[in-house]
Amino acid sequence: MKRKKWMAFGLAIFWMLILSSGKEVSASEQESETEAEVGELELPKEEFLFEDGDVVGFIGDSITHVEYSGVSYQEFLYNYYITRYPQWELEFRNLGVGSYTAADALKLYRGEWGIYDAELEGITKAVIMFGMNEALTGTATEEYIENIQELTELLKEHGLKSEDIILAAPTPFDQTRSSNYLEDGQMYLRVDDSIREYIVKLENLADTLGTHYIDLHTPMLWVTSLLQKEDQDATLTMDDNIHPNGVGNALAGYFFLYQQGADNDVASVRILKNGDALAENAQVRGLKRKGDSYMEFSYQPQSLPLAVPLEVKEANEYIGMLEGISRETLQIEGLRPELRYTVYMNRVKIDVFTGAQLAQGVNLASYDWNPGQMAAKDIEVLNQKWHRSSAEYRSVLHRAAREESTASQEDVDAAYKEWYKTTKEQRSQMYETARSSVERACTVEIVSENCHMWMGQELWKWAVEGAALLVAVLAVGFHYKKQKKFN
């Protein structure tokens, strides 16, 4: 008998004890309520996803720079694109600078600060998001729009076309939380009033220039209103009411993807009653089925699910966004609707579902022990390092490219060189993790509650083999003891 079976015997006994310890309540059977669905907003949804080979520059203020948090909306976007399209070569560049307005970005890229930012060179797509600092400093709407238009023209001078540029309405200033109200019931700061004026004109400008437009302001306000129904001081920002917190950045990333036209399909497998398997963006091999009680097959998806760290998990509780952006479907016909079935991936329990749920189709994408989710989280760790490396370079640039500079062009050049080397390695590691994951198949098992099989073998056989192993161990022990006594 093979050694790995002996090693698995102990695990088999362990699982037998667990399964016999009483009826458990699965995560899939617990009702999960979300506050609302994005469809209620009627957000525009076009088809302008980034493409293989793109170098995307995100130009903005501290909400783009994001040196205050380990999570950014660009990071959310990057994890989606790398996991969904692991064979691509897509590069993101953080071109945000804390405290900047669109006018400051114009000064930087026109050379008025006397500092050269090489990171702008070579980008093929650009996202422009300003407005918060303009609103905080009282910039008139006409001036704000004029600066955005000039920045768009500057990018065209660098070789971009209108359709390569996305004008983004900024995330909101949270002026509706209870801590922003005075004792007499009046709002203390009304910064968001100005931002609302900006974004009306910004959308019109996008239409006029022929650029794309993404609105992060309206949906973020909508989710904020949902939160504040339960807690009047709840917010998607830091305590300053300005910068999105981790959950806010995750939601901003989702709303960005939604309006880009991103779909929800990672991969899907459908097992028919006759034993045939239909797969989309995946391969299924070696299907073995024992009636309606046991099934096993090799499963190799060509994409990974979106990573679900704590911030994304919490954001999902508000609007159920993962169903709309990351769905890895397992659907099985011919099972008994009332029976409970345990789904394993690589011999590790994922969850328990009823036959009726499996017939309808279940989403495995977000489960921690899904091999794809495990790889996606590894990518997310690297992604956060990419984010920090990017923010560090932008901080050096910021110290140099302002009226009272505290850094030189030499400092910027040295920081750029380090940024280039580090982020290139991090990007390579992220793609290597994604590609190596989709090159490996995993074993999927579906086991009914009245089935006596594990790892494709009847449990009584495991017991017999275990007993044989025990006898062999005792025999060896007896022989060793006898030999020791003789000596």
Image (cartoon, helix red, strand yellow):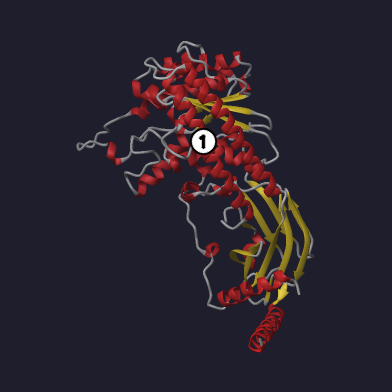
Q: Residue at coordinates 61% horizontally, 15% vertically from top-left?
A: 158
x and y, in percent, of residue 307 in the image: 56, 47
Question: What residue lies at 49% left-to-right and 18% top-to-bottom?
Answer: 410
**Residue 361 x/y as whole percent:** 65, 58
- Residue 477 position by quadrant: bottom right
Q: Is residue 295 above or below residue 369?
A: below
What kind of element bears circle 1?
helix
Query: Residue 403 or 237: which is nearer the viewer?
Result: 403
Q: Quadrant of residue 417?
A: top right
Which of 225 and 450 lies nearest the eye of the viewer?
450
Q: Which residue is mark 1?
A: 387
Residue 135 appears in the picture as rendered: yes
Left/right placement of residue 4 relative to residue 366 reads: right
Q: Which residue type carries mark 1?
A: His
Which residue is depicted at the point 69% across and 36% down?
Answer: 88
Vertical arrangement, residue 240 with respect to residue 340, above or below:
above
